[in-house]
Amino acid sequence: MSEENLVTVDKYFNFLSEKKLMGSKCPKCGNIDLPARRLCSKCISDECEWFELSGKGVLKTFSSIYVGAKAMTQKGYNRKKPYVFAVCQMDEGCSVSGQLIGVEEDKPKEIPFDMPIQVVYLKTRTGEDKEGNPIYRWDVGFEPQK
Amino acid sequence: MKKLNRRVAIVGAAMSKFGINYPRLRSIDMWQEAWINAVKLTDKGISPKVIDEFFLGNFTADLFNHQGHMAPQMADLVGLTPKPASRFEGACASSGIAFRQGVMSIASGVNDVVCIGGVEQMNELNTEGVTGALAAAADTTYEYFAGATFPGLYAAIANAHFNKYGTTPKDLWNIAIKAYENGHENPFAQEQHTLKEIMENKKNKAIKRGKPVPEWKDEYDFLGSRSNPMIAYPLRLFDCSLITDGAACVFLASEEDAYKYTDNPIWVSGIGQGSASLSLHDRNGGLLTGLNATREAARQAYEMSGLGPKDIQIAEVHDCFTIAELAALEDLGFYEPGKAATAINNGETKRDGIRPINTSGGLKTKGHPVGATGVGQIVEVFKQMRGIAERNRQVKKDIKIGMSHNVGGSGATVVVNIFTKEKI
């Protein structure tokens, strides 16, 4: 595997910033991992390659969070305005965590399990560079399929 | 699963008072208190001279107190210098791991007598600071920016359990009520009020302040009230364990040495430790309604001891949240998946039930000084098996077989131990 194609965390997040959901696919056993892994999670082959996912899946479980992580309270979420932390399984079989948007966060009983979702890309400001320009990170999020 | 090469016994065990001890008492003070109490509960006494090695569980004094390298510091305070002293980290299972390493060091023949400690001083930080430090036990790379918090991760497990098995907030509430009843009987617990007393106190405060007095008839009225706010649906404030300072201490000896320290050793008959991915989402095909690593650790401990779930008479299980206790009862094999709630509602896990669970009050009311929790649980099992549990919490029947179950993070590390009075 060339250095250029090596599966690394940094590249995974760079792909997210380009709004590309890139997992890894094992050429030996066909398993797909998300987030991407250098070693296949099933057969531990070290030949995994980048693989673009459809971004479609279903909601496996979630919680509406009223006392949030600092990364979320900084975005304005609080006891009166909860956000939803979700685990979704992609159509390709792998699962990932993310914020679920586009639902009524304070009515968790009405959010259905196994609801079809699609991936969205969410931006968080994490700091500033030396010139004072904002630094962002991009994360996987979900919304109900339209 | 192999057997231990030679048998290992607990000869003494005790803890400091758990609670909001900082700044009155710090790690240094609480650890010495735990040691002194453990020496007192070692029938024939024990001296640092006979101890070959020290194993310390501590999650993150680095973040809580800006103190790393804690094992030699704690060892020195109790006269163990220059013996080997090492710290073990597995989030909230840190001292559970330390205990298992100590057991194996005796079984291997390297050591004859060892000391296991656990210590954590959390209240130096405010709640936001503590939450931030604890978040380091989850997957910072992939979970944190998805909004995961510890209550949130366990809430996601609870929500999946509710969805699959029809479990309800009231089922979880019965776990909380029991925890308060047991904590009430434990002089070492952080919260020694029953829920009814807490409700009365809140009513009296409202009267004093001239505010509307809540009209709660019983604990179930309190469940959905404003005094018990939602933290992470479906978990509310009183579903969560406490932020605690505390320390605990256990002495272990080989089968040849144990009787030098007591005529009634408690044998470590099964040990197990399991792991799972750090992220909840990576537990592919995994149990979102429970913890795979608990099943693995329990499998090992049952196999080593030759015992099964039906043999376990009491257990201290890791109830960092009410749902964690319910899931543990199923993952440890006490009940089929989805069946624990009915048993809890029938009182089977109360002190006078068929298998009392968390007689100490558990992490929920005894408190959860994360790095001290695993050894703290062993202290309670030791006391119950010796028949020396304080106040009214001593289980009436003779406990011959007990268990402790200690979880790190959202279940990436789990340790299970089985203890027996007989050397089986």
Image (cartoon, coloured by chain):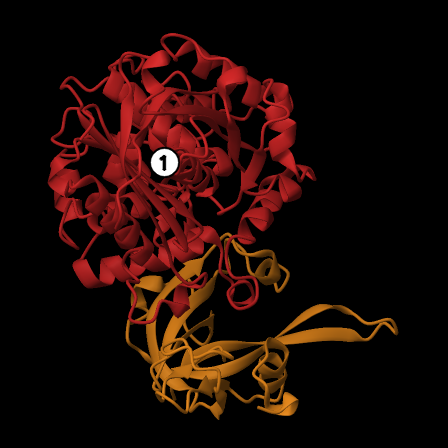
Near-viewer residue (B271 or A86): B271
Q: Is residue B297 left or right of residue B237?
A: left
Q: Secondary structure at mark 1?
A: helix
Q: Position of residue A4 (x, y in %)?
A: 65, 91
Give the quarter of the image for residue B355.
top left
Q: Give the chain ID for the red colour.
A: B
Which chain's residue wears label 1?
B
Image quadrant containing the C terminus of chain B: top left
Near-viewer residue (B389 or A71): B389
Q: Residue furthest right?
A: A131
Q: Position of residue A50 (x, y in %)?
A: 51, 90
The residue carrying mark 1 is B107
Residue sitting at x 50%, y 80%: A36
Colour seen for chain A: orange
Q: Position of residue B303 (x, y in %)?
A: 20, 47
On screen, residue B67 above or below B21: below
